[in-house]
Image: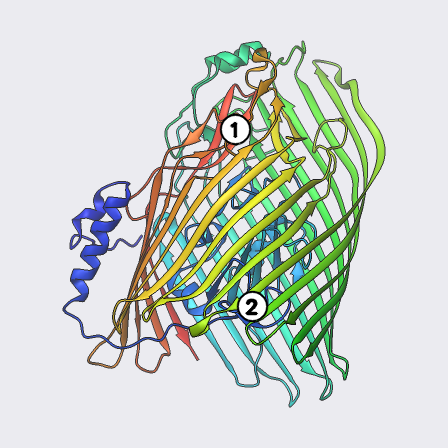
């Protein structure tokens, strides 16, 4: 295990708080004063977020673009890292369910509200973001509803992962790293020309977390927090003719282990008696960070707590340049296998476990026509998706509980969950004059959802065996949802390359059925958004992007856990008002300061609801309560200092901090995470030939303790969650060729 001495900055040993971060920054700056400097240009990133090429400054939308150099230097490897960099973005993970929220929107209920795509292919499951953990060219994060160009599941925003393109020149890299908790990673990429018209790029990675940061308190519980992950990606680019091009993408990610295990956040075990689990009140639990109790391996019904996941994707992109415009077709097939075993009671005793298997097959087809003319840019497109999922969730209750005289089993079977989605869209930008343009777009979406469900309860009677005690749900239902969404943007160029814009947009997220229970379907969620923004330079050395926005939601979808069932309900209205500011200042030829501020006022409207933990309180009026995962204040601050050493090599110091005010985790606002600050430090050395790079890193340098995910379970007698990762120290070496 590697440890790096930080005694030169003793303030690093102080926990928490934004002031601690400022002390660290001063220390880093004091170290840099003795070093010579050199000028480093700030890269202007070209994006394709609006399905046409433009720079971030030219794009009339709230967008954050992160280039490959920043991705590597900051060690961005997953969505958890992005939430400390991108304004208004949050990421949680409970029971291996990924949830991305932007501006407080994106509640996970099987249909996440933030869309994720890889090289233009919409990812049907949030877990598939793992496809973008290596060899990336850039990351684009669009904030706000993107219902016209991206359609379903983009009501909160879009995360685009763009991988590196093949070239005719042979190049690549080999990377290896090691850090705390026995985290090791190896990665490589190789690409070049196969023939005069065809090139390839192949990348692969292997990572292993040996011990994890969770402490299992009872004997025989086995390893908690380990994970093995393997990934590969192959891209082939071929010029079929002077006007035609074909791109092939094949990728896979596999993982297994116990990367996360949720624990008790507070002790409400007195509730367990009321819910028919008196045994729970007698068991040991821990509410301390990074401490868990788990059923021992030898006693677990379905084996040790673990996750087994595989994600495969294959896509073909065809691009044709015609006299009319550029035609692009993207055809993709995706397969997803997800299996996990979970100790649901969080104690050393065998009370109840969960065994879950999900199989998903997804086919997508997108066809676009892009027309560029003087003073005009048009995009016409069509989209089709067929997504078929089967899911089996098995709850084992090893003790007589929940009112049953014998051990019981709950089986929730979705034999078939099929979604067929079709959409057509048109979007155009028209120059009114040399300084002013208007953009108009419209999208028509049709979603047809079919659900076959078979839920039942079995009793395990000694000497008799298992017998079905009750059939709780047996049905096949079909629902159809239609929506027309639109957008309009007015953009005006000011002197000096500055831009202002005002936009109106609509978003739509289809309805569906609850994951477990045999209940009525929930209605679609709709939003109307208004935004004004500025992009440009406020001084010779400072650029700034700012946005002021308002969202009005109707039939807002809320995920709840009632007992052992996950339920999605419509909360009625919700409103989000907010302000975002991103800025970058060149303090000198060698020092760059980037900083951001987000203010959110995200609240429910008229919303009567019953708390599953406290049903005796009856319906509660939640109007005015804050949306989940929507901190009122978020701050980002980063300092990048680069210097040229006498040998010709370069040394870069990066210090970054993310501050979040209080975060609520449920619509009842009855549990929250107080304000906290995460500080990450990176020291990067690169030789003069730019062929060898070494990165030393400290993640969560102040060792802040904070809750990153939350689950309320009435039958468990309380609230459960996942704690954020503690301080991690390590290194990484990259050899480019």
Labelled disc at residue 624: 1
Residue 437 position in % (x across, y down): 60, 69
Q: What residue is shown at x 68% (from left), y 18% (from top)?
A: 408
Q: Nearer the viewer, residue 27 or 197?
A: 27
Looking at the rendered structure, the secondary structure element under dot 2 is strand
Labelled disc at residue 492: none
21 vs 707, left or right, is left
Q: What residue is shown at x 17% (from left), y 53% (from top)?
A: 9
Q: What residue is shown at x 25% (from left), y 77% (from top)?
A: 38
- Answer whether labels 2 and 1 touch (C-beta < 8 Å): no
Location of mark 2 (residue): 163
Between disc 2 and disc 1, whose residue precedes?
2
Q: Quadrant of residue 527?
A: top right
Q: Is residue 135 visible?
A: no
Looking at the image, is mark 2 or mark 1 nearer the viewer? 1
Q: Nearer the viewer, residue 113 or 339?
A: 113
| The C terminus: image quadrant | bottom left
Q: Residues within 10 Å of mark 2 (few under 14, many from 20)?
A: many
452 vs 150, left or right, is right
Q: Is residue 139 visible?
A: yes
Residue 485 position in % (x across, y down): 72, 51
């Amino acid at each position: 295990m590697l440890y790096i001495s930080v005694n030169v900055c003793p303030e690093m040993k102080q926990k928490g708080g934004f002031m601690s971060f400022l002390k660290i920054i001063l220390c880093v700056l004091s170290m840099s004063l003795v070093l010579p400097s050199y000028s480093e240009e700030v890269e202007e990133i070209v994006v394709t977020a609006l399905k046409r090429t433009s720079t971030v400054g030219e794009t009339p939308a709230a967008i954050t673009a992160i280039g490959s150099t920043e991705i590597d230097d900051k060690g961005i490897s997953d969505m958890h890292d992005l939430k400390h960099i991108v304004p208004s973005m949050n990421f949680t993970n409970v029971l291996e369910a990924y949830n991305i929220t932007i501006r407080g929107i994106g509640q996970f209920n099987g249909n996440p509200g933030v869309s994720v795509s890889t090289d233009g292919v919409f990812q049907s499951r949030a877990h598939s973001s793992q496809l973008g953990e290596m060899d990336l060219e850039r990351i684009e994060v669009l904030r706000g509803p993107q219902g016209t160009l991206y359609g379903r599941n983009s009501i909160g925003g879009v995360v685009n992962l763009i991988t590196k393109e093949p070239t005719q020149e042979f190049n690549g890299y080999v990377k290896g790293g090691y850090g705390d908790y026995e985290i090791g990673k190896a990665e490589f990429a190789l690409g070049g020309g196969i023939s005069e018209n065809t090139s390839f790029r192949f990348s692969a990675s292997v990572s292993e977390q040996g011990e994890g940061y969770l402490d299992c308190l009872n004997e025989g519980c086995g390893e908690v927090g380990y994970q093995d992950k393997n990934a590969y990606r192959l891209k082939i680019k071929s010029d079929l003719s002077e006007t035609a091009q074909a791109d092939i993408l094949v990728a896979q990610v596999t993982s297994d282990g116990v990367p996360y295990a949720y624990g008790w956040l507070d002790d409400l075990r007195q509730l367990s008696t009321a819910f028919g689990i008196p045994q729970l009140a007698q068991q040991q639990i821990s509410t301390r960070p990074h401490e868990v109790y788990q059923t021992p391996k030898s006693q677990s019904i379905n084996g040790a707590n673990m996750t087994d996941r595989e994600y495969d994707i294959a896509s073909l992109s065809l691009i044709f340049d015609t006299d009319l415009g550029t035609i692009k077709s993207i055809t993709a097939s995706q397969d997803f296998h997800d299996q996990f075993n979970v100790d649901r009671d969080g104690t050393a005793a065998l009370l109840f476990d969960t065994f879950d298997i999900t199989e998903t097959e997804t086919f997508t087809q997108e066809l676009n026509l892009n027309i560029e003319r003087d003073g005009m840019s048009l995009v016409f497109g069509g989209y089709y998706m067929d997504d078929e999922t089967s899911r089996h969730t098995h709850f084992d209750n090893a003790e007589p509980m929940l009112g049953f005289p014998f051990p019981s089993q709950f089986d929730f079977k979705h034999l078939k969950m099929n979604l067929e989605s079709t959409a057509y869209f048109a979007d155009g930008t028209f120059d009114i004059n040399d300084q002013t343009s208007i953009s108009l777009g419209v999208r028509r979406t049709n979603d047809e959802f079919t659900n076959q469900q078979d839920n039942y309860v079995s009793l395990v009677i000694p000497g008799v065996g298992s017998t079905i005690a009750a059939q709780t749900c047996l049905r096949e239902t079909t629902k159809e949802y239609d929506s027309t969404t639109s957008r309009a943007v007015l953009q005006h160029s000011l002197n000096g390359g500055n831009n202002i814009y005002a936009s109106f947009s609509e978003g739509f997220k289809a309805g569906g059925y609850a994951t477990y229970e045999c209940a009525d379907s929930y209605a679609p969620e709709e939003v109307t958004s208004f935004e004004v923004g500025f992009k440009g330079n406020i001084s010779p050395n400072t650029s700034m992007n700012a946005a002021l926005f308002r969202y009005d939601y109707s039939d807002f979808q809320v995920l709840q856990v009632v007992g052992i069932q996950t339920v999605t309900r419509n909360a009625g209205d919700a409103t989000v008002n907010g302000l975002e500011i991103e800025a970058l200042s060149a303090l000198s030829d060698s020092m760059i300061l980037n900083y951001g501020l987000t203010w959110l006022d995200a609240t429910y409207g008229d919303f009567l609801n019953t708390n599953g933990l406290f049903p005796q309180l009856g319906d509660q009026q939640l109007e005015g309560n804050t949306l989940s995962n929507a901190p009122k204040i978020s701050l980002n601050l980063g300092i990048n200092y680069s210097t040229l050493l006498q040998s010709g090599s370069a040394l870069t110091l990066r210090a970054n901090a993310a501050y979040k005010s209080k975060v609520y985790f449920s619509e009842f606002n009855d549990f929250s995470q107080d304000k906290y600050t995460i500080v990450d430090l990176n020291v990067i050395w690169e030789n003069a030939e730019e062929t060898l790079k070494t990165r030393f890193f400290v993640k969560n340098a102040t060792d802040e303790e904070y809750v990153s995910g939350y689950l309320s379970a009435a039958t468990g007698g309380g609230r459960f969650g996942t704690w954020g990762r503690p301080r991690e120290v390590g290194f990484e070496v990259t050899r480019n060729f």
